[in-house]
Image: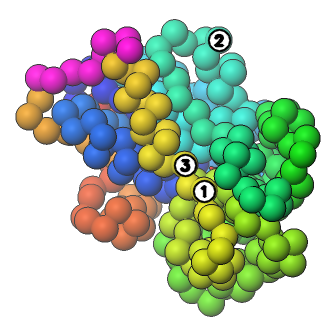
Amino acid sequence: MQSGFIGIFDSGVGGLAVYHAARKLLPHQAFVYVADSGFAPYGGRESAYITRRVTKIADALVDHGAKALVVACNTATVTTVAALRAKHSLPIIGIEPAIKPATAISRNGRIVVLTTQRTAESEAVAQLCIRYGAHVQIMLQPCPGLADQVEAGNIDGVEVKKMLRQYLAPAISLTSDVVVLGCTHFTFLANQIQNLAGPQVTIIEPSEAVARQLAHRLSSNEMISTNQPQATEAFYTTAVSLSAVSTVMSKLLGRHIEVLAADDLGLAKI
Ligand code: DGL
């Protein structure tokens, strides 16, 4: 992989939907995806732990020649994106729960945001609620354990269904008409969430919006390379079992991919 790639990372597999959308929109770019599966999930950890991991991954990608970064993880963004932007001058796109768009489209002013524990408790989300929540009711619903299920590739098992029913119960009894997916892992549960919440509920899933923002930042900085006939990609994980991660990532992307060892981020093969 030559330098000048777009580095996309998450605690694990959740950011793959963002990657998929970005690759579709930017078909001539080089991409490197890093899943910090060996240190996931982030959602129940202290901020300091998450910041240490996220900084380490971002530093490694920058050192290897990334031209832009996408922090494809709400938990990582709300804890660390400001520090990353202070440290590195390349474009860095983050993902925060889409509270602003939710308030714009809600008809009854009752919004539920599904997140990890850390995101729900973050200052960044508190600020979004203050800024956009004056005339609406925003319920933050932490979903402990749910990202772990997706991480293990369990996207339609009995346990997932049980958790979804439990975590969506407040949204249903609140008769909220917008549910925000505030954790990238939950994208892979979007159909089930829609089925449980009902057709009258709009589910906000941010992958395409994030990809558009990435494309916009690259194009306004004249950073879109056109000299490759098609996108190139490489996937890395910090997990010990490469085959287990390859299996889950292939399942979620719907095609076979090979995942390489991040070598605790020496990212040997880049
Ligand atoms: N994918 C991450 C997010 O968007 C969280 C998953 C985890 O808990 O590690 O917040």
Percent across and percent down for residue 126 are 87, 39
Q: Where, quadrant-wise, is the C terminus in this rendering?
A: top left
Residue identifier under label 1:
204
- Disc with the residue nearer the chain's start (2 vs 3): 2
Boundaries of the magenta span: 220-227
Hey, what amino acid is under mark 2?
Ala
CA separation in Å, label 3 and label 1: 6 Å
Left or right: residue 167 versus residue 3 is: right
The residue at which mark 2 appears reads as 86
Residue 191: give x, y in percent of width and height: 53, 75
Q: Badge 3: how crowded within 10 Å, few (<14), some, or many (20+)? A: many
Task: Residue 83: say if magenta.
Answer: no
Q: What amino acid type should be assigned to the residue bearing mark 3?
A: Pro
Q: Nearer the viewer, residue 237 or 205?
A: 205
Left or right: where 122 falls relative to 248 = right
Label pair 3/1, CB-CB below 8 angstroms: yes
Q: Residue at x 62, y 90 (%)?
A: 158
Q: Position of residue 27 (x, y in %)?
A: 22, 39
Mark 2: C-beta under 8 Å from nearest atom of ligand 1: no
Disc 1 residue type (three-letter): Ile
